């Protein structure tokens, strides 16, 4: 059987209740990725980052390109990539997805926060090079950059569910190598999910170690694959999403009420003692 373009859409209420989210971009899913601009926030130890951005547009420090350090959350302008693409080659962790960090210029200092879920904007695509950038299990839009970007209407988010790495000297291996192939496929007029599949296949043919293959397997695409739905199916999808969101809200409210009752009983029991 031929490979199919596939994608994932997390069931976070902030995404399925948002009319501008990728869930409702059904008719757009077959359109080419409109990568007219590409911005970047990169830790300063990743010299290939500006080469990757240069595949789309010149990397201009302080405008569409920000090394961290010296740049960090406090001095990176909001929305510098809005409506275009964003490449985040920063540090992420397994426990907190609310922010990615850069690298300190002075050894021993704390890693500076360089991008956060609160800084998410609408984009054509966000390409994450951070470890655990696509880990969303047990997270919400407040503590997951991936979910926050999708809730803002990002057409596609790509990242790793586990560790991510890039080669210091070239884009031949690691996530930079994948994103180079992804951009090249997008330039041929492919929808983002198709470009994702083609790039994976192209890179897989060049890999020789199991660690590289595992790294590639952990790359995840969030967004709609190319699909064709009529208006009735689209309406049914929206109604089902709204119903699921209502049930999730009801369960959350019931849990809060149960927790409040438990706390009240505990307080009464303590008073009796």
Image (cartoon, rainbow, N blue to C red):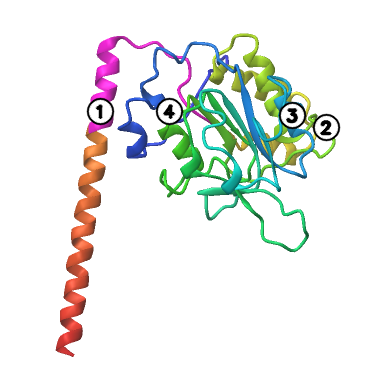
Q: CA distance from mark 1 to mark 2?
A: 46 Å
Secondary structure state at the residue bearing disc 2: loop
Q: Indicate which disc, 1 or 2, sits on the residue closer to the N terminus.
A: 2
Q: Indicate which disc, 3 or 2, sits on the residue closer to the N terminus.
A: 2
Q: Indicate which disc, 3 or 4, sits on the residue closer to the N terminus.
A: 4
Question: Eyeballing the image, is 192 above or below 164?
Answer: above
**Image location of residue 41, percent across then percent down:** 65, 38
Magenta segment includes 231:
yes
Side of 230 relative to 182 (left or right): left
Q: CA distance from mark 2 to mark 4?
A: 32 Å
Looking at the rendered structure, which numbered label has been put on residue 240?
1
| Highlighted range, magenta | 221-242
Secondary structure state at the residue bearing disc 4: loop
Q: Nearer the viewer, mark 2 or mark 4?
A: 4
Residue behind mark 3:
177
Q: Nearer the viewer, mark 1 or mark 3?
A: 3
Q: Quadrant of the N terminus?
A: top right
Q: CA distance from mark 4 to mark 1?
A: 19 Å
């Amino acid at each position: 059987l031929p490979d199919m373009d596939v994608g994932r859409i997390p069931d976070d209420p902030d995404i399925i209740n948002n009319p501008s989210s990728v869930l409702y971009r059904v008719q757009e899913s077959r359109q080419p990725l409109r990568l007219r601009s590409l911005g970047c926030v990169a830790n300063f130890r990743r010299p290939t980052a500006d080469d990757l951005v240069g595949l789309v547009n010149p990397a201009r420090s302080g405008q569409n390109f920000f090394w961290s350090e010296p740049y960090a959350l406090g001095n990176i302008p909001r929305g510098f990539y809005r409506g275009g693409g964003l490449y985040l080659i920063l540090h992420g962790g397994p426990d907190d997805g609310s922010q990615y960090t850069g690298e300190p210029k002075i050894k021993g200092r704390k890693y500076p926060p360089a991008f956060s879920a609160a800084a998410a904007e609408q984009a054509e695509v966000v390409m994450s090079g951070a470890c655990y950038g696509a880990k969303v299990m047990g997270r919400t839009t407040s503590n997951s950059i991936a979910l926050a970007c999708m809730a803002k209407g990002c057409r596609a988010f790509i990242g790793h569910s586990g560790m991510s790495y890039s080669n210091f000297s070239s884009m031949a291996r690691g996530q930079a190598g994948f994103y180079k192939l992804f951009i090249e496929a997008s330039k041929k007029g492919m929808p983002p999910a198709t470009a994702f599949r083609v790039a994976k296949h192209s890179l897989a043919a060049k890999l020789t170690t199991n660690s590289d293959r595992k790294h590639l397997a952990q790359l995840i695409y969030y967004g709609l694959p190319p699909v064709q739905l009529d208006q009735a199916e689209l309406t049914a999808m929206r109604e089902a999403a709204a119903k699921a969101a209502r049930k999730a809200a009801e369960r959350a409210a019931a849990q809060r009420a149960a927790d409040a009752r438990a706390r009240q009983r505990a307080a009464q029991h303590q008073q009796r003692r």
